[in-house]
Each structure stands twice: as structure tokens, then as C-alpha cells.
Image (cartoon, rainbow, N blue to C red):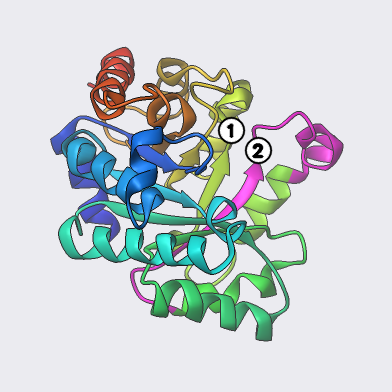
Amino acid sequence: MKLSQLENNIKNKKSFLCLGLDTDIDKIPKHLLNNSDPVFEFNKNLIDQLNKKIVAVKINTAFYESRGIAGWTSLEKTINYLNRYHPELFTIADAKRGDIGNTSKMYAKAFFENLNFDSITLSPYMGMDTVSEFLDYDEKYPILLALTTNQGASDFQLPNNLYESVITKSKNVKGAKKIMFVVGATKSKFLKNIRKIAPDNFLLIPGVGAQGGDAAEVVNSCTNSENKKILINVSRSIIYAGNDENYVFEALKKVDEINNSIGFK
């Protein structure tokens, strides 16, 4: 997907919302367990009903990898369904990969070629050479961990402003305009500074909802009438808003609540 398409979708839908499919088979409504692939059925129903109110979908691979072949099959079916029926939605493999060049080349091939995700989250802490293989693909986007939502971010990312170094260093590589950054909504006081360092890059912002981040505060901190390059990911508080046959209806209500709270301008 071209970034211009993503920006247009944000403006046309008046939404920054990214649906996080952190789908845990132990938490989905019990009536779905009668399906041959209950995780895919859960995901598909949400996608079909929410697609007009969101601009992106993030699939957290850990929830699928933990189930072995069955989980990976659910992941493949979900991304294939998105690409076939909802190609307007920007897709993110939340895989947090990061390794030396030869290994990164294989990761890039797996997620960008075989699965055809638009983007992937990466840990850049082994150096920028671990990112370069992902920059060789047209209209595919590495999303670097910069300042994450968890409390442990203060162990390494905040001392000596290491997160700033990650962003600054990445701006000097070929294809830098394609790089996006993960910045947690729970670290909103840093967003204005990050936007100054990276005024033209997309930010993926998790942590709204179950983790306590505030969507409106995020939007006010790093967007304006000209720059709307953010994706606000919400996972658990949407997908588990309901716990029985009404789960899609409850998810719709939650999406509307979040979109309305943002007050898109």
C-alpha cells in the first residue's frame, strides 16, 4: 500500500484506529469453538463489521505462534482474507523481529512476500543493518520500536534518551521515509518531542484502552490539520468488549466510542 492511500483512508474515514487482533482462543466466545477454525471465525466477523470504521489491522503473531501449526494456519487465513476482501486496510505483522542481515532477509521474505503484510514491527537494538533488508521492498514498511508502553521501557529506552537515538539514526538510512515508529500512548508526554524529531514519519501508537492510554491526548500531542500520520492501536478493549454472541455488536460500540472521543478534525 502507498502511504498516500493510508493517509487518504484516515481522512476519509475520520479515524486513526488500528484493530489489534491479539486473539486468544481461551478468551473468545464459547459458541465459536464449534467452528473448524474458531480464531479465524472470530477475526473474520470482527473485520467484516468494523472495516468501515478502522484504517488498519495489527496481528500480534505471538497469539498465533503459541498454538503451533493450528495458530499459524489461523494467521495465514486472516491475512489472506484481509488482502482479498479488504485491501484498503493497512496490515501490520506485530512480530517484533530483529536479527543480523541474513536472518532479517528471511524474516522479510516470510512477512512481506509469503504473507504479504504491508508492514512489520522490528526491534532495532542490534543495529540498523538489521533493518535494511526490510527497506528493500516497495510499498512495505518497517515499524521500529522506539518508546514502548511497558514500564520496563525505563530500563533501556529512556536513560540517555536512547529512543531518540533510534529515531535519529534511522533517519539517515536509505528509504528512511518508509520507516515508522512505535510510541506507546502511555508515554504521551514524549510525543511532542518525538514528532519534532520525526515530523514526517508515521507513528504506531499502542496502549490506548486496557493499558490506560488516552486517544484524544495522543491525537492532540502529535497531529495537526496537515499531519495525520498516526495509527492508534486498540486490541483487548475492542475484541473482548463482549463475551458471547453479542461480541461483534459490543466491539462496534467500543470502536464508535473511541472514534468519537478523538474528535477528528
- Residue 125 x/y as whole percent: 76, 59
Using residue 167 as the reference point, say whether residue 243 is left or right of it: left
Residues 155 and 211: in front is 211
Judged from this view, the residue extending furthest toward the bottom is 102
Say which amino acid is labelled 1: Gly
- Residue 81 x/y as whole percent: 25, 61
Q: Classify residue 96 by image quadrant.
A: bottom right
Q: Classify residue 197 by image quadrant.
A: top right
Using residue 75 as the reference point, say whether residue 84 is left or right of it: left
- Residue 217 x/y as whole percent: 46, 16
Quarter of the C terminus within the rendering: top left
Q: Residue at x 58, y 82 (%)?
A: 105
Q: CB of mark 2 within 8 Å of CB of mark 1?
A: yes
Over which residues does the magenta segment extend? 137-162
Residues 102 and 227: in front is 102
- Residue 24 x/y as whole percent: 52, 42
Q: Is residue 223 magenta?
A: no
> Of helix, strand and loop, which one carries label 1?
loop
Residues 225 and 137: in front is 137
Q: In the displayed structure, would residue 204 be above or below residue 208?
A: below
- Crowding around mark 2 (Cα neighbors within 10 Å: few <14, some 14 to 19, many 20+) is many
